[in-house]
Amino acid sequence: MAGITRRDLLAGTTALGAIGLIRPASAQAIAEFYRGKRMNLITTASPGGGYDQYARLLARHMPRHIPGEPTITVQNMVGAEGLKAANHLYAVAPQDGSVIGGLSRNTGLARFYDFNNAAIQFDARKFHWLGSPQQEIGLFIVNTKSGVKSAADLKTSREITISSTARNSPSSIYARMLNAMYGSHLRSIEGYDGSQACLMAVERNETDAHISGGSSAAFRARFRPWVQAGNAAVIMQMGMARDAEFPDVPTALELMSNADDRQLFEIAFAEQVMGRPFVVPPGVPAERVAALRAAFDATMKDPLFLEDAEKEKVEIAPVDGITINNLLDRAYSAPAPVVERLRALAK
């Protein structure tokens, strides 16, 4: 076995693992299709950003898990808040499995919220979602000087101000949803330049609190010392499940008293679960979709991938593609009154 590296051994076993999930004859055909091929990964992100970082990390490691072991080249296609790349993947890109897309997490519900937008030329449910290496969870962070100690206090306290970037940001949308469905008294102060500026507003007592749409490592590093010092507290989580760092803090879903309200938050939180999603176009043959999904899932468990992710300080908390497709199906099939209510709150 001279000359064979650990990476070579891992590549052989993982590629065989992906093939093992498909019928033998089809697996051979898939390997023949991908062998020697250069695939494109089209991402909506500009170079150097978080989405781009995940795309390039995936492009380095996923080829080992695809039968035939092709190479993957990242192509940045920026424009129209991610719609340009999504439209291209849906209708222009080859439909043979040679192209992967890295989309923004709000792409999946773009038509849900803005169904009359002519710029949206795709049906998100028809993409074959491979999955996401990360799931987001938002956090409701309060300055303890506000007097708020728990989510229950939001119903009885004075008006609580929330730092936010804009009316259509998750911070402001979640605040309006909580006012309407939980009985809180939140007022968004908008115009802050990004999540770090929103946190600074809480630190400086300009606002009482901040509700985040996500919680990156840099974001947590900023406020964690405040919590440890007793100057701030996390009183609610904005996601499908509790984060391991805050096991005793309830999610907004858990605090909703009826099924309709829970469904609204489940739809809103679909974007959180989608995190940094990857897709293949709708016309890709089913057996190639299965092979790429298996390769994506295997990559998320790959020690070399995880080692690189740790070096780059990239968080890995994967969700599979079928889960994302199912989330979108549930969102778009929600009863009309639920859809109309959420659209009104999101405006």
Image (spheres, rainbow, N blue to C red):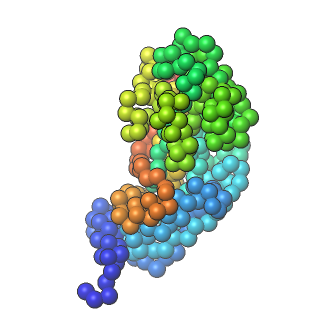
Image height check: is 311 above or below 170? below
Q: Position of residue 25 (x, y in %)?
A: 30, 70
Q: Residue at x 58, y 67 (%)?
A: 74
Quarter holding the N terminus?
Answer: bottom left
Task: Give the residue at the far front of this rendering.
Answer: 229
Q: Position of residue 88 (x, y in %)?
A: 64, 58
Image height check: is 37 above or below 105? below
From where the camera sits, is residue 336 visible? Answer: no
Task: Give the residue at the far bottom of this rendering.
Answer: 2
In the image, 243 versus 27, the foreground residue is: 243
Q: Position of residue 324 (x, y in %)?
A: 45, 44
Q: Residue at x 34, y 78 (%)?
A: 8
From where the camera sits, is residue 41 visible? Answer: yes
Task: Give the residue at the far right of this rendering.
Answer: 191
In the image, 198 versus 294, the foreground residue is: 198
Judge left or right: residue 253 versus residue 196.
Answer: left
Q: Residue at x 42, y 49 (%)?
A: 317
Image height check: is 102 above or below 15? above
Q: Residue at x 56, y 60 (%)?
A: 53
Q: Position of residue 104 (x, y in %)?
A: 59, 49
In the image, 78 versus 222, the foreground residue is: 222
Quarter holding the C terminus?
Answer: top right
The mark tally for this picture is 0
Task: Give the residue at the far top of this rendering.
Answer: 156
